[in-house]
Amino acid sequence: MTKRQSKQPVDESRRKFLKYSGAALGGAVVGGVIGGLVGSNLNKSAKEAPTPQESEETPTARDQDYNHALMFFSQEQFQTTEAAAERIYPKDDNGPGAQELGVAFFIDHQMAGAYGFNAREYMSPPFYKAEASQGYQLTFKRRELLALGLDALNEYSEQKHNKKFYKLSPEEQDAVLTAFEKDEVDLKDVPASAFFAMLRNLTIEGAYADPLYGGNRNMDGWRMRNYPGNQMSFTEEIEKEEFIKMEPLSLRDHLQTS
Amino acid sequence: MANKLPKVPVVIVGMGWVGGIIAAELTKAGISVVGLERGKSRSTQDYYHVHDELRYASRYELMQDLSKETVTFRNTEKMRALPMRSYGSFLMGDGVGGAGVHWNGQSYRFLPYDFEIYTKTAERYGKNKIPQDMTIRDWGVTYDQLEPYFVKYEQMAGISGPAELPEHLGKMSKPFPTPPMKTTPAMKLFTDAATKLGLHPYIIPSANLSQDYTNPDGIERAVCQYCGFCERFGCEYGAKADPVVTVLPVAQKSGKFELRTYCNVTEIMHDGKKATGVKYVNTLTGQESVQPADVVVLAGYVFTNVRLLLMSKLGQPYDPKTQKGAVGRNYAYQTNGAGSSVYYEDREFNLAMGAGSLGSCLDDYNGDNFDHGDLKFLHGANIRFTQTGLRPIQYQPAPADGPRWGQAFKQATLHNANRILGISGQGASMPNRYHYLDLDPEYKDSLGLPLIRMTFDFLDHDRELVKFIASKTKEIADQMGGTKTTVNDTIKQYNIVPYQSTHNTGGTIMGADPDTSVVNSYLQMWDAENVFICGASNFPHNGGYNPTSTVGALAYRVAEGIEKYMNKGGSLV
């Protein structure tokens, strides 16, 4: 197993790309992004020393993420989401869980935007009961279903254990979530399994989406999977027999600033 | 009040592969063309930040906005059709380039058998082999007739493929213009295993370029970087052939082409015999316009082409009770689901790396390349291993019978992320009397116009095909030197929720019989000689392949047909 631990693989691959393709193309009719690749920051990450904040793995440095604040959730909904997501994607020997990865912030931000409002989905009436083969046919928007589901998690936990969901032991939390997953809960018309499936999917997205969305903190979700993130080229590696570990790159690494 | 515009020679509805090819060919011949596209304009520069799985793959950035228009679906006529409220089974494109932007680039020619499926089946097995309600038919064009147009398409797109293909595929009069893609260790395992079994694997012909390429129109494109972001993404390098980087620049350079974006066509204007033009709505301003034209070309996706004919009351709608009428009949799909997985406890592969059409495949069990005498299905599947680039949100490799969340799930997905190779069959889909498209009686789009309604299900012969193909994938998988193999050999009812394939076909099918087909072999409408309809909606059934090369070939043929028609008029057959 080899490691490619370069600090600037993006620049390497860009140079390679320019060398093998871009230069040959010259004034190409199409492929306009080639011009964009020769950007002002082409060598920036290689030349500039990392700032102290970037290099220090201290809690103080992490707390500087001003994006980690709430756009949609109440404080209690946030705590409930964070606790539930951590059970869906827990911290273990492999690395951080949902809480450390910032998954609850990811979910909060998603619910505040177009996805939470089902903005690009067909939400016109009438609504009829569907066969399973016909997919989601409820009037709930995602943000509504999630908010109701989180309340239901707490209500069910209080009925069973006299505590809010986020105060339960991990084993108790798993049992509550399982009851929702299996539709064994009937609270205020909340379709428990639809809520659970959505929460599960959002948790996985929050663990593995580009960190720009608020989760996958420090790209640690990608690191655990040996996923290289956003690389420009694998031309040199694609035929290699051995598995190649790479330091991942995010979309942030591609941003050109003037 | 609709704004009436000056008449133009040709108006094309939809600016995907078909619209782009026709626009390029006609303008090169000196014919003025107006292209109408309901979505926005595009260029490769839009994809500088395209390596974003959430935005493009999970949130469908490049796809049609379903809040404005979707389809309704039911398995049988006994069910009430309900709208596809969010994406699942298939993904409709939007904007300039259409679905030709977010495709993978796998580029197969349909088999000679496909174009004469009825005749060849009857010849070899007798007519009784064809089940009662299976409405397969010859396409009205043979492989040999279509062959020169395949060549045109492949040269234009720069298809990268092997110098020689197995003998049971259609003969090529001209080899692929660029050599095959690179071979990965996993592709080698598949190929070696298949060869050992006496099968005939080959590298998948690809619209992701294996080397820099200049096509006959002088369009230069760069080599693929194997970055692993093809399907659902646009290509920032222009290495993946799409209309925006191939045919549309040619049309634009001619000075004879006017592209109008944000124009959603709602009606083909006609007098019952010929079309007079189209009506469209500017989706930004709401302004209605009428564009008169000598020739109207429908170049939308399957659903758009059928829906526009039905909304415009042009052609005879298909009625499954009487089997009369042609518009909407022979809707077919892709019979996927057969597959095997090979696990390797002792090694990992670089599965994040890849390209949309990087892989190896075989056709020993596709078309009629094997004896169906004792089998309860017709046709077959292309069996393949692809390395398209696995991404962490959409790929969760945990055992199907294990937990779907929690620590065990997390550990399984992390452990397996680069240890499983999948062999799968892309099954052909046979048409059926009761599978069709019509207008939904209840649900409307954002303009108040009826949605298209799909009635479709998997039938027993589909389940038999999947079972058979799955057993073949298992034989290959077992030869691949893994530590464990698993197989999926079962499909049930068609379910619109999980993603399966964006290879929807039929509805405006081609043929030699005006009563049961919508267009002739030049894709000219039987009921209106100045209307040409082209796309996978022309397919009377779907083969065991990705459809784009065959659609591309048809587009070159229809371009030639339109030119002929403009010179002399009348029916082209």
Image (tube, rainbow, N blue to C red):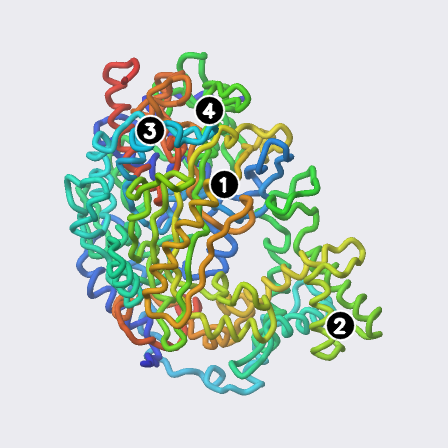
Q: Which of marks 2 and 4 is in front?
A: 4
Q: How far apart are marks 2 and 4 (CA)?
A: 56 Å
A204 shown above or below B558: below
Identify residue for label 1: B460
Q: Is residue B107 left or right of residue A188?
A: left
* Residue drawn at the location 50% of the way across and 64% of the way down: B393
* Chain under callout 3: B
Identify residue for label 2: A165
* Residue drawn at the location 66% of the way across and 45% of the way down: A137
Residue B495 visible here: yes
Q: What element carries label 1?
A: helix
Crowding at label 4, few (<14), some or many (≥20) Cα neighbours within 10 Å? many
Q: Which of marks 1 and 4 is in front?
A: 1
Residue B476 at x, y percent in the picture: 33, 60
Crowding at label 2, few (<14), some or many (≥20) Cα neighbours within 10 Å? many
Query: Do residues under tags 2 and 1 come within 8 Å of each other at their CB atoms?
Result: no
Q: Nearer the viewer, mark 2 or mark 3?
A: 3
Q: Distance between the residues labelled 3 and 4?
A: 26 Å
Q: Which of marks 2 and 1 is in front?
A: 1
Query: Do residues under tags 2 and 4 come within 8 Å of each other at their CB atoms?
Result: no
* Chain under callout 2: A
Same chain under badges 2 and 3? The reply is no
Crowding at label 1, few (<14), some or many (≥20) Cα neighbours within 10 Å? few
Q: Residue B122 carries which label?
A: 3
* Residue drawn at the location 48% of the way across and 73% of the way down: B414
Q: What element carries label 4?
A: loop
- The residue type indicated by label 3 comes to Ala
Residue B146 at x, y percent in the picture: 24, 32
Identify residue for label 4: B327
Quadrant of the rendered image containing residue A201 = bottom right
